């Protein structure tokens, strides 16, 4: 999280944060003017005291009118300043939150797959919600306090110096002591704040995991386990938050006491006859007013530190996330519609962070328009191989070419445009059936095309039974559909895309044998004129493939057509035998 390197050092981060002000600079300017006005009016209250005291000592008709007017004017000016500073700072804050949040989101959705494998969604969501809000605190509330109270203190000090510099110096001696204290407190604030963020992420993480997996939790009686896990995460979060509150709570009174001591010394000195001789009582009261008035802004300036440190810790996290490298997209070649000739040469692959080769020396040619089936036991690397074609992961050794162009030379968007993918895990969005089929670049496809795709995927039969047909809203991730129905929508989506390459990774595994056979017929229709890589759970569904490839532990152990492989009496025949006897049983 909080890295010690220069890029994320406090001041660097703050500077970068201020860069976000650009779009709302005018609001920021108004807020600054508001703060200045507020500060001047606040500081003016001390000299105003002088008039009040003098007016009391020399009552006159003129003073009787002037002094009350003065009070109203000072407070009105301060109120106006306060309004402009508060409202326009809030405006600036919203602008920053919005920009940072959307930037973070756009960045996260473009990160490589390996990033999502390694990070929980809970933590990512918490970054977008909690951390960004913390950042804004630093950027705006802190600036408000610094400007407003900082100017007030400067105004008051200016007045004090002007009115009696010797006394002012005494008052200032206590300043450095406060300064040292503040810097000690600063360090602990930042550390604790960073811990709070991590623990907040943990809270969201545990919660979202339990909510998503509530069925598993119920059937396996995981409630109490999840409760403990959540309670631990929450307790950790609370203890960190309390630590911060403790530091915050103790720092304020300590600093206040220090200020009161300095004021006491001041009064003691001021009351000495030599000093008093040179001052009118009005001046004296004005001076003490200024000195005591300093306490509140100084206290606020020290408190703002917690907000700043929290903001900086959050910014460090947000910025290091924003700086996280997105998917490499160095290719330059764009193709409109490829023929679909896929060639895999000496391909080896290991997931990042692991030495274990998941794929080893894979050589495979899938001619345009042909269907190749991958079979093999679970864990043999079939899905991994399929996921390398849309370049979800980058491989180091070997190559994959599409129409003789290395995949890495193609623009990612252009490459992915050529591919329709259906996997076992179907993702549906909280939107209408039609919009779920016509998703992404397919958005706005004519309804008749959507209907045609749904028909081919045998989805029409259940869509027409939904209350509003194609306009029916699916819940979160299509919860109100069965696994088979969800999969049929995913197939319809892939069919609508009409891409030259089709990848089916156990796409029909959630279907019952009857529906599978149905869809199989439809799929075979679409496979005809496109390059298809099909990973099948049930071998019966791929018997007609042009080539069947058997994988074992990341290697290709056998290739051939169904009949060839059966007569070979090798790995495929064994798998086949196994499923056949299972079906008999
Ligand atoms: N995202 C991942 N990160 C690290 N290892 C993975 C990942 N996905 C799969 N693996 C590993 O790669 C191997 C092959 O998995 P996979 O390609 O999913 O096999 P199959 O699809 O044939 O069942 C397995 O040993 C699995 O543990
Ligand atoms: Mg798989």
Image: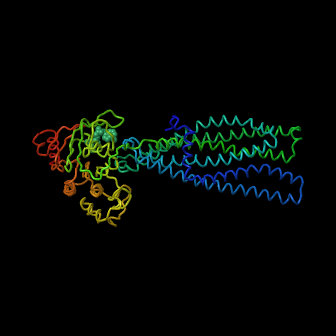
- Please, is residue 145 above or below residue 10 in the view? below
**Coloring basis for residues:** rainbow
The quarter of the image that holds ligand 1 is top left
Q: Which residue occupies the foreground of this view, 349 or 274?
A: 349
Residue that extends furthest to the left in the rendered view of this protein: 567
Residue 240: x and y in percent read 54, 40
Q: Is residue 207 above or below residue 167?
A: below
- Residue 130, how many percent across, how many down? 51, 48
**Quarter residue 189 falls in:** top right
Q: Residue furthest top?
A: 355
* Rendered location of residue 100, percent (x, y): 50, 49
Instruction: State whether residue 398 appears in this view.
Output: yes
Judged left or right of residue 393, residue 204 is right
Using the image as rendered, state which of residue 120 and residue 447 is in the foreground.
Answer: 447
- Quarter of image, res 379: top left
Which of the two residues, 26 or 486, is positioned nearer the viewer here?
A: 26
């Amino acid at each position: 999280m909080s890295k010690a390197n220069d890029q994320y050092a406090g001041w660097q981060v703050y500077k970068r944060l201020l860069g976000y002000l650009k779009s709302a600079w005018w609001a920021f300017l108004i807020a600054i003017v508001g703060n200045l006005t507020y500060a001047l009016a606040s500081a003016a209250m001390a000299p105003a005291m002088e008039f009040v005291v003098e007016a009391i000592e020399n009552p006159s008709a003129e003073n009787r009118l002037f002094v009350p007017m003065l009070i109203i004017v000072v407070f009105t000016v301060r109120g106006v300043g306060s309004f402009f500073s508060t409202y326009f700072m809030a405006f600036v804050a919203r602008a920053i939150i919005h920009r940072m949040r959307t930037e973070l989101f756009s960045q996260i959705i473009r990160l490589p797959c390996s990033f999502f494998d390694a990070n929980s969604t809970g933590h990512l969501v918490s970054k977008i919600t909690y951390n960004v809000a913390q950042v804004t605190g630093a950027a705006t509330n802190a600036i408000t306090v610094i400007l407003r109270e900082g100017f007030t203190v400067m105004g008051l000090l200016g007045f004090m110096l002007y009115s009696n510099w010797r006394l002012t110096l005494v008052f200032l001696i206590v300043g450095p002591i406060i300064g040292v204290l503040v810097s000690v407190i600063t360090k602990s604030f930042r550390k604790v704040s960073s811990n709070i963020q991590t623990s907040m992420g943990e809270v969201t993480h545990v919660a979202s995991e339990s909510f998503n997996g509530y069925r598993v939790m119920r059937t396996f009686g995981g409630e109490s386990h999840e409760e403990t896990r959540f309670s631990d995460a929450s307790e950790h979060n609370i203890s960190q938050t309390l630590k911060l509150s403790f530091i915050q709570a103790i720092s304020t009174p300590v600093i206040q006491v220090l200020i009161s001591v300095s004021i006491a010394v001041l009064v003691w000195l001021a009351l000495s006859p030599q000093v008093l001789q040179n001052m009118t009582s009005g001046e004296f009261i004005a001076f003490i007013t200024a000195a005591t008035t300093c306490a509140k802004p100084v206290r606020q300036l020290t408190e703002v530190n917690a907000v700043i440190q929290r903001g900086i810790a959050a910014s460090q996290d947000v910025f290091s996330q924003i700086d996280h490298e997105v998917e490499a997209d160095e290719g330059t070649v764009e193709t409109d519609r490829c023929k679909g000739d896929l060639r895999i040469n000496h391909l080896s692959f290991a997931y990042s962070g692991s030495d274990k080769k998941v794929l080893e020396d894979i050589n495979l040619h899938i001619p345009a328009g042909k269907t190749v089936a991958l079979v093999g036991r679970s864990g043999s690397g079939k899905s991994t191989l399929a996921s390398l074609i849309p370049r979800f992961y980058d491989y180091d050794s070997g190559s994959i070419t599409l129409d003789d162009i290395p995949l890495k030379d193609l623009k990612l968007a252009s490459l992915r445009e050529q591919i329709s993918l259906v996997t076992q895990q179907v993702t549906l969005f909280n939107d209408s059936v039609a919009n779920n089929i016509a998703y992404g670049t397919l958005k706005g496809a004519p309804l008749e095309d959507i209907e045609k795709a749904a028909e081919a995927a045998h989805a029409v039969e259940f869509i027409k039974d939904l209350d509003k047909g194609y306009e029916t809203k699916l819940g979160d991730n299509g919860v109100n559909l069965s696994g088979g129905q969800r999969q049929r929508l995913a197939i319809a989506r892939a069919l609508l895309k009409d891409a030259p390459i089709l990848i089916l990774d156990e796409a029909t595994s959630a279907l019952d044998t009857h529906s599978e056979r149905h869809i199989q017929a439809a799929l075979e229709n679409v496979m005809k004129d496109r390059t298809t890589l099909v990973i099948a759970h049930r071998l019966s569904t791929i018997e007609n493939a042009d080539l069947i490839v058997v994988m074992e532990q990341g290697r290709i152990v056998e290739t051939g057509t169904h009949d060839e492989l059966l007569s070979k009496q090798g790995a495929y025949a064994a798998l086949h035998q196994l499923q056949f006897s299972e079906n008999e049983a």
